[in-house]
Image (cartoon, helix red, strand yellow):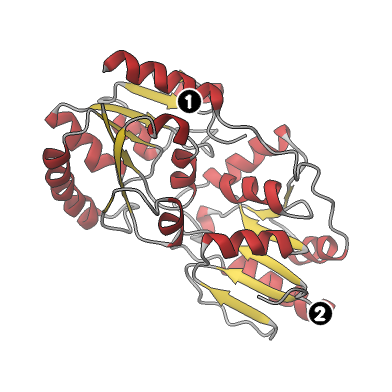
Amino acid sequence: MGKNIALIFVSAGTTKFNFNRLLKSLDRVALELNLKEKLIIQTRTNSYSFNFRNIEIKKEFSVKIMIKLLKKARVVIAHASPVIIFLAFKYSKNKPLVLPRLKRFNEHVNDHQHEFSQFFKKKTDNVIFLKQDNLQKQIRQYLLKPQRNKIRNNIISEPEELVAKLIKYTERIK
Amino acid sequence: MKLCLVSSRGGHLYQLYRLKKWWNCYEHFWVTGKGEDTKYFLKNEKVFYAHFPESRNIVNALRNTFLAFKILVKEKPDLIVSCGAGVALPFFYAGKIIGCKLIFIEPYDFVAYPSLTGKLVAPIVNELLVQHSSQKKFYKSSKYWGKTLL
């Protein structure tokens, strides 16, 4: 991967459900803005045909490359998985832009991503959750003016409490 | 003490992986799916591969049930742990029949209702751990021992 490629990284996760709704909005925004950056998209299922040309779509990247992409991307856009959000907190320059998958669009088995977003936005403002209406407008606005990641390098600690209790348990049942 | 770590790929795997300071203390093996994430995180680990996709997939659930008995009878783990997703179900039920102890950890992103896997394994587990104390209300004897992520 070249040293100075400007890019937007999009992660749709390892789930088999498509996320064409996000990809379509992104495509329109990229064309509208005449985006100079490359759109690199990780999606397991790809049934959307982009009009915007400067794209790379892969089912998945190696973890090492994914971390590089998170670090290099000007903006990270993701589905509402706590792990990708966590990794974006660790590595990315700006706050991640997140769209919860919804059951009614056949994007997941249920609406736990939506519920999780409602819960998580009360805990932190370090992630920008997209509202379900006017996706294009929100994405355009954020690509023009992203917000700095406040957590990066202030790394989230190890799960010490849970580890300690699990060790206590296994030592007891030995 | 031997552990069996059962996990779907992606976020479930990462959450369970975050508990390395615990599971690495004991002899252990993994049951998961093939992919870039498992290749990276489980590079030097002992891994068995189950059948995917497992989400609401009866055929793979049956195949995984046969696989579960095969693996568990051979490996004889003392404890089976999972943070989802559906692949845990056949392994937990097979494990229960064989006499393994079972811990299910509700995934971090369940905050408003119980996960389907959680509901289905709750009757047979030794411990059901939630990652937000507000999740405790969905499971009768669940406990909050902390979070894998933030």
Q: Is residue B55 left or right of residue B68?
A: right
**Quarter the N terminus of chain A occupies:** bottom right
> What's the residue at 63%, 82% (across, down)?
A50
> What's the residue at 78%, 64% (across, down)?
A74
Place of residue B8 in the rendered image (x, y in percent of width and height, measured from the top left): 38, 49
Q: Which one is in front, A163 or A148?
A: A163
Place of residue A146 in the rendered image (x, y in percent of width and height, measured from the top left): 84, 57
**Residue beneath disc 2:** A36
- Residue A42's place in the image compared with B73, above or below, is below
Q: Which one is in front, B57 or B99?
A: B99
Q: Which one is in front, B34 or B142?
A: B34
Residue A72: image quadrant is bottom right
- SS class of the residue under badge 1? helix
Query: What amino acid type should be assigned to the residue bearing mark 1?
Result: Val
**Tag of residue A163:** 1
Labels 1 and 2 positioned on one and the same chain? yes
- Residue A118's place in the image compared with A32, above or below, is above
- Residue A113's place in the image compared with A47, above or below, is above
> What's the residue at 64%, 32% (across, down)?
A157
Residue A115: image quadrant is top right
